[in-house]
Image (cartoon, grey):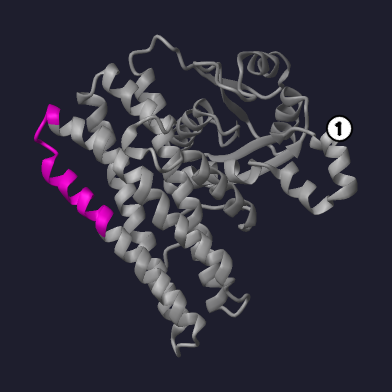
Amino acid sequence: MYRHLLVPVDGTELSTYTAGQAVEFARTLGARITFFYATPDYSATGDGALQIAVAPSQFAETALGETRAILAKAASAATAKGVECSIVEVVSDRIHEAIITAAVSNGCDLIFMASHGHRGLRGMLRGSQTEKVVRNSPVPVLVSSVETKDPQSAANRALAVIQDEHRSLSVVIHGLLHFSAEALLGKAELDPGLIRRMIRYLHDFPGALHHPKEEKFIFHRLRQRTHEYDALIADLESQHTREKALVDALEQALDACEKGAPDGLKDFDTAMQNLARAIWDHMGCEEKTIFPAARGYLDNADWTAVAEAFEANNDPAFADVADDDFGRLFVKIANLLPKPSMTTGDSIRK
């Protein structure tokens, strides 16, 4: 049976959904995953060549692009399920060849990728690339098909976006846990500027966009269809409020740490552990209970509305905030975090 999967990712909804399928598949097999991303060769473009000459540091950031963010989110999806994973990033414009090379050189015994998407999704996981991999790979290829006529396609599309946002939050949490642990061990000092940026992301993004959309477009619709989950939904909504208080407590702990409080680092770490545990428990409840329940009760029209709400800032209730702003902020944060490495589970210290 397969023990090591190569899973190409590109950050699209299709890729996010396929990565989730691959994680579940690997979990059932007891296999590990190598997530793969091919960054286009920016240096080969006119803009890239000019930037190398006049602003090499800016070139490095531009060339990296969303690579680190995309791979970090994929690794977070595996970590949440206890699946061992690693990441591989290469610079290449010949995607199918890079995928095959990565599978062979990393000792993978299966390539897990999607057949095609819907709604003109951008990215590398298109039928043409998959077809080339299937034709030329010496490693077996498992193609995960996503059909636009599938009655579950709208639900898959919506939940892919929501779970991708969950993975973004998890990446930032993992980064904060890492920096806190390094500081406690005396290996590095906390960078207050970076830490504050990460804390503000955890404060602003869920509060302004993610939580309100969950409540309005999923919780509300589920309540309309059944009262079976009313108590759990009420608890989840109260957790949204408690989460904000825990983020505020973390920021206060950072203030005290900066001012030289005797147990400042320890208190900051405790506050971070409390926040991480609360957010992971909350997201886990949604993904294990609420979202499957919603699949059973919401119809295709409901899921289409949910998907459109999460995909674009097209609802008057969210007119003052933009998903793209938080997306750009997340990419900047992810590029400053340590490169994701082999991981097997959440790093909350008991």
Residue 228 part of the magenta-drawn span: yes
- Image location (x, y in percent) of residue 100: 72, 27
Q: Nearer the viewer, residue 169 or 96?
A: 169
- Image location (x, y in percent) of residue 194: 57, 64
Residue 53 part of the magenta-drawn span: no
Report the residue at 65% width, 24% height from top.
124
Magenta range is 224-241
Report the residue at 61% width, 57% height from top.
337
Under mark 1, the amino acid is Gly
Can residue 83 be spotted in the picture?
Answer: no
Magenta stretch, overall SS: helix
Q: Is residue 63 left or right of residue 52?
A: left
In the orientation shown, which residue stands out farthest toward the right? 53
- Image location (x, y in percent) of residue 236: 22, 49
Residue beneath label 1, please? 46
In the orientation shown, which residue stands out farthest toward the bottom? 262
Quadrant of the snapshot with the C terminus: bottom left
Q: Is residue 228 left or right of residue 165?
A: left
